[in-house]
Image (cartoon, grey):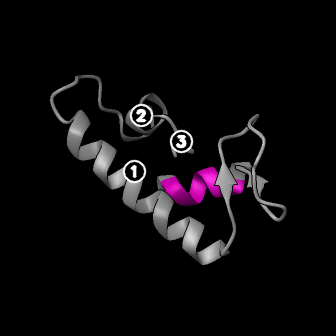
Amino acid sequence: MVIVDLETVKKHLRVFHDDEDTEIGLYRDAAESIVTQHLDREVVAAGETPTAADGIAATPAIVSAILL
């Protein structure tokens, strides 16, 4: 599940080409996994509805943590 889309990550990194999309996507996936594990709950992209009872939509703070 993608919480922060690739274009947002690339904009944050100031990457304007597609040469490293695969690698950036892997880093993004790892960051999302770590943040989700730390929160110990389902996190979905902003505007989406979680399926778990204690799930949450990504807040700006969660997105910032993923981008760090």
45 sits left or right of 55 in the view: left
Please tell me in which quadrant of the rendered image residue 21 appears. top left
Image: 21 above or below 41: above
**Position of residue 60 measured from the top left corner of the image (x, y, whole percent):** 71, 48
Q: Amino acid at mark 2?
A: Leu
**Position of residue 10 measured from the top left corner of the image (x, y, whole percent):** 37, 34
**Position of residue 25 measured from the top left corner of the image (x, y, whole percent):** 32, 43
* Nearest to the observer: residue 46 or residue 42: 42
- SS of the residue under disc 3: loop
Q: Which residue is mark 3?
A: 4
* Nearest to the observer: residue 52 or residue 43: 52
Q: Amino acid at mark 3?
A: Val
Give the magenta range. Answer: 61-66
Q: How many badges with numbers are in the image?
A: 3
Q: Earlier in the sequence, mark 1 or mark 3?
A: 3
Q: Residues under labels 2 and 3: Cα distance?
A: 7 Å
Tag 1 near tag 3, CB within 8 Å: yes
Q: Residues under labels 1 and 3: Cα distance?
A: 8 Å
